[in-house]
Every structure is written in structure tokens, then in C-alpha cells.
Amino acid sequence: MTLSASLTPLPVLIPLVGAALTLFAGRRPRLQRAITLATLSVVVVVCAALLHLTDRDGTLALHVGGWGQTVPGMGPLGITLVVDRLSALMLVVSSIVLLAVVLYAIGQGIRDGDDRQPVSIFLPTYLVLSAGVCTAFLAGDLFNLFVGFEVLLSASFVLLTIGASRDRVRAGISYVMVSMVSSLVFLLGIALVYAATGTLNMAELAVRLDDVGAGTRTALFAVLLVAFGIKAAVFPLSTWLPDSYPTAPAPVTAVFAGILTKVGVYAIIRAHSLLFPGGGLDQVLLVAALLTMLVGILGAIAQSDIKRLLSFTLVSHIGYMVFGIALSSQLGMSGAIYYVAHHILVQTTLFLVVGLIERQAGASTLQRLGGLAAASPLLAFVFVVPALNLGGIPPFSGFIGKVALLQAGAQNGSVLAWTLVGGSVLTSLLTLYVVARVWTKAFWRSREDAPEGHLSGAAPAALLDEPEDIQFVDRDHVGRMPVGMVVPTGALIAVGLTLTVMAGPIFAYAGRAADEVLDRGQYISAVVGGRQR
Amino acid sequence: MTTYLIPLALIGGLISVGVYLLLERNLTRMLLGLLLIGSAINLLILTVAGPSGNPPVRGRVSDGETATADPLAQGMILTAIVINMGIAAFVLALIYRSYRLTKGEEVSDDPEDTRVSQLTDEDAVARDEDLPEPDKAKDTDAPDELDALPRQKGSR
């Protein structure tokens, strides 16, 4: 075991140990915050080191506990952790987002929290969520991927229903049920794959599935796609998302919107390229991608609550990633990988900004908002940069990712691919319309012109739900935006802009990651040791 | 490998009952449905992992069978059972909380969803638009005519 391979379990281990320590420190909020920040900072450093090492040396694989190939011809029996360029990029972006969001949540908690809030379980649960996300990105076998999903889902159930108000319980129940169904479908897929091949190690599966009949392969792929499609919110399976995300506290929604759906997209990439290459279901995926984009963005147009509106744009933009994956080409895959990184950052930032809007103006619905540009030019700035980025205005990273995907679609040249190119452009324009509508309503007009502008939520609350409405004029002055909330938001915007400024190297990296994902040889030889058939 | 019909029929039956329960609006029934499907899938893993009767410990003989039973399948089932149990406990707590809050245990619709879906076309346009009606009394031919909007001073 090399030194670099021994780094691979750390992104899972450190947050879990941190979660245990924060639970013990439940009575001491300061210590709890310090442990959380230290933990997630170390994770960012480890992930960055992994990114550097995989880019230099190629795929890293670790057989945990030395359970490598104990029986000849059976494949690794134990848990395998694998980091290639794709996982490393996902780990780095997610860990940065996790750190920024927890900083934001802590900043909000210090300023607006009070004693009745369940802060003592928030940070441990958040760390468990981080461990689950990292497990999913590191997993080298399907069952470990399942366990990663379950860990992050269990933590997300707690975070989504924190405080257990009426709205959150209602949203939480449908979220729990839908997630559990998707997990059961995934487990069903695992059972069927195991029946067909006798292994669950992804590298070994990639070798063995080539010998399985085409019909069986397609059926297995379809079952797994349904499971991952629910997680990633791909169109017919996406309706749960806008119902459940908006009720959660702002930092929770931000991290869910940024990372959890992308874990599903990552699993789709793995299944599509590593396990079932050859593009058996590409036509289905392309149609699903088109419908995801269009139905999502049309849903966003109909909403007046900004959180719901952004949830719909989230669904819509998942379509771009599925589009890139389903093209099965190098350019399509690199575009999709770049777009995933871009979208994690921009969507998280926007939800954090909505949290700021809610705190400052006491509402997140366009029926009540107005005059924010005059009230706080800084808020207007932190909204407009990620919003234009989401809409795909040049020179932001959203534009670069979309151009890559459009080029890949044009390169493919089939009628369906051209339809998707048209659909992507239309979706991009409608996204711009949607964010421009938020801009004109919430930021430009005066608050008196808003139909319900006189109403507002009571006091700003960090994690709890405040259902009662008061007159806006009666609302206490909330002061300036807390530095602890603005700085993480600004930092995420800066990281998002790095994707633009450093677009050349980062896109080249995404290209190398795509090569590696499509090639499979490196992944397989790193795990099962060059025994290719 | 011989496939036995009875376990497969049992799995099919459990899953269909589970799906039926899951489609209800009553929360306890939904949970029972989830648990039934979970058990069915565990049974499926056990069924696909090889014939029954093999000894679980390597090198032993059980009723004439010498091949070792697949430990991986049993490990996976154990993990799945533990996960299912934890989440079932959480769902039960959630159901109880929902019952305390709403005095019912039905899943309710998203109110915002219902509101948006019931909007007429005119409502949908007017919903959060500011469509100021010009105030005729303030409307003059003076150059600042455009100011004659509600809550604006206008000319005179």
C-alpha cells in the first residue's frame, strides 16, 4: 500500500470521527464549531492532495483491511476505495462547498440562533452527511455505493426535518418515502447484478458484464438507472425535489441542491461508462435529458417563491449533465464533468443568497419582495453574479460548459442530438428569463409595488421555521448582513469565477477525467491488477 | 444452478403487496409497504446467492453439502436489515410527529403546489406582477405624465 493510496479513506474517516467528537461536545457550541471547521478544512486539504496525486500518478485504489484478491478469479471480496480524476474532482468541489456552507450556517447561527434551536445535532449530522457524500464518490463497489447513499440519506432526513415544524414534517415524509423507494430499487439492482455476475466490485463487474447477454445487461442498467435517476432528479423521477427542498433551512437546501443530486449524476456516469459501456440506453437518456430541461424550466417560470423557482432550475439543469453523458463521446463527457463542477458551485451559491434575502427582507417569495437593490447593493451583487452564471452569460463558466455540450451535440450530428442542442439553447434562454424576473421583481421594483409587500416573516431564524407573518413595517431592523454569512457566499462566488478564469486548465483536466472514464482500462487495472480479458 | 419457484413466488408476492401498501396515503401503511419490499429484496439476495443447505463455515459438512455458503450475500443482507431498521425507526418518529401536529396520518399535498396549479391564466400573470393602473385623475398632458401611477405624486 503506497502512501498516496493510504490517503483515500481519510475523506470518509475524518468527518465520521469529527461527528463523534461533536456529539460529545454537544453542550459546548464553540468547541463543536471549532471541531467541525477543523474537520472539514482537513478534508478539503486531503481531497486537494488526492486530486493532485491522481492527476499525476493515475487511479488510486485501496483494498480496505487488505481484503484484496484472496481467492483467485473471484475479484476483491472486501471494500475497495477507488479515486480517479472524476472522483477526485467531485471530492474537491464537494468538500469546498461543504466547508463554505458550514461556515455560512455557523455565521448565521452565531448571529440569529438562540437557545431553543437544535444546534447541537446540526453539526454532527452535517459531518455524517459529508462522510456519506465522500463514501459515495470513493466507492469501488456497488454495495459500498449503496451504503454511501444510505449514510448521506439518513443524515439528510434529519437535516431536512430539523426543528420538525408542520411544513418540514410534511416535506420530510415525502422525501423520506421517495428516497427509500429509490434505495430499494438500487438494492434490487444490486441483487440482480450479483445474480448475473457473482461480484459487486465495479472493476470486476466491468470485466464480467461484457460476457453477460445484451438483453440482461440492458435490463440491469435500466434498474440501476431508475434508482440513480430518482437521486439525480431526472425528469419523470424528479417531482419529489421541488416539493421537499424549499422548506428546509437555507444552508441545508444549499448543500442538498449542490451536492446530493450530483451524487446521483456521478453514479449515472459510473454506471453508464464503467459498467455498461456501449450506450445501450443512450436514446432513452437523451429524451429524458430533453424533457428534464424543458419541464424543469417551465416549472420554474410558474413559481413565485425563489426557493421553489431555484429547485426547478436545479432539476432543469440536471438535464444538461445527462445530455453530455448520453452522447457517449469524449467531448460530451468532459462537458458534463465540467458542468457538474460548475453547477454544484453556482446552485449552492444561489441558495445561500436566497438565505441572505430571506434574512434581510423576511420573505423568499416574489409576491412580497422588492427594493433589494437599493436596500443592499452588496446583496444585489452576490445575487447577480451566480444568477448570470446560471443563465449561461459569457464569459462565466455556465457559458463554457454549455458551449462544450452544444459542440458535443453538434459533433454527434443525429436528429435527436440536434433537437437537444435546440432544447439546451431554449432552456438557457428561459433560465435567463427566470433569473431576470427575480432580478426585476425582488431587486428593482419598490416594495410597495409587490402584491403582498406589506407582509413579512417575523424575526430572522437560523435553522427553525418561522411560519407566522407580521406587517413588514413592524419587523425589527435586522442590521447589516452578518460577515459570517457574506464571506462564505463571496468565497463560493470566487471559486465559481475560478472555473471561468482558469477555464483552460480546468477544462483540460475535465477532458483527462473524461478520457479516463471512457477508457476503463486504468480503473480496472488499478483495482484488479492488470488482469484484463 | 437450479432455481426454486417457491422463494421467487414469495418475493413477487411480497413486493406486490408492498407496492400496493406504498400507494396508500396512510403513512403507517406506506411504512409497512417499504418494510415488506425491503424484506422481499433481502430474500432475493439470499436466493440468488446460491443453493440452500451449504454450511456457513469453511471446511465443515452439513447434511452432505460441502461447498461453503456465500458469506457476501449474508453480509449484504445484514447491512440492509440494519439500515432498514434505522430508517423505519426514524419514519415512525416522523409519523408520530406528523400525528401530533396535524391529528392525522395522511400525506398531505404541498400547499404551494396546489396554489400554483389552481391559478387561472389571468391570476398567473397578475400573481406577482406589479401592474399599476393609471390614475385618471392625475393624468394630464404635462411632461411628467408617466409619474401618474399609483402612489406616485404625478403632476399637481
Image: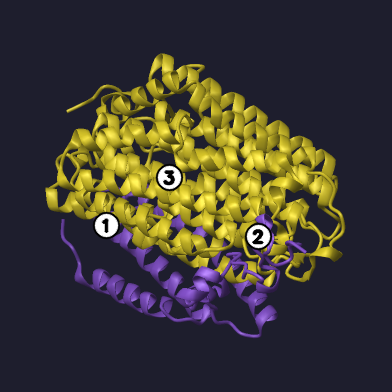
The answer to whether the residue labelled 2 contacts the one labelled 3, judged by CB atoms less than 8 Å apart, is no
What is the crowding at mark 2: few (fewer than 14 residues within 10 Å), some, or many (at least 20)? Answer: some
| Label 1: element kind | helix
Residue B49, image quadrant: bottom left
| Label 3: element kind | helix
User: Type of residue at label 3?
Assistant: Leu
Specify which label sits upstream in the sequence, 2 or 1.
1
> On the image, numbered disc 2 is attached to which residue?
B145
Q: Is residue B62 left or right of residue A395?
A: left
Residue A509, visible in the rendered structure: yes
Quarter in which the C terminus of chain A is drawn: top left
Chain (purple): B
Residue A114, image quadrant: bottom right
Chain (yellow): A
Q: Residue at x 58, y 29 (%)?
A: A495
Residue A361: mark in rendering: none
Q: Residue at x 74, y 65 (%)?
A: B151
What is the crowding at mark 3: few (fewer than 14 residues within 10 Å), some, or many (at least 20)? Answer: many
Q: Nearer the viewer, residue B102 or A411?
A: A411
**Residue A107, image x and y in percent?**
77, 42
Instruction: Between label 1 and label 3, give the one nearer the viewer.
Output: 3
Residue A1, visible in the rendered structure: no
User: Type of residue at label 2?
Assistant: Glu
Q: Nearer the viewer, residue B37 or A353?
A: A353
**Residue A440, image x and y in percent?**
59, 52
Q: Is residue A454 left or right of residue B8?
A: right
> On the image, numbered disc 1 is attached to which residue?
B48
Q: Is residue B139 left or right of residue A278?
A: right
Residue A145: mark in rendering: 3
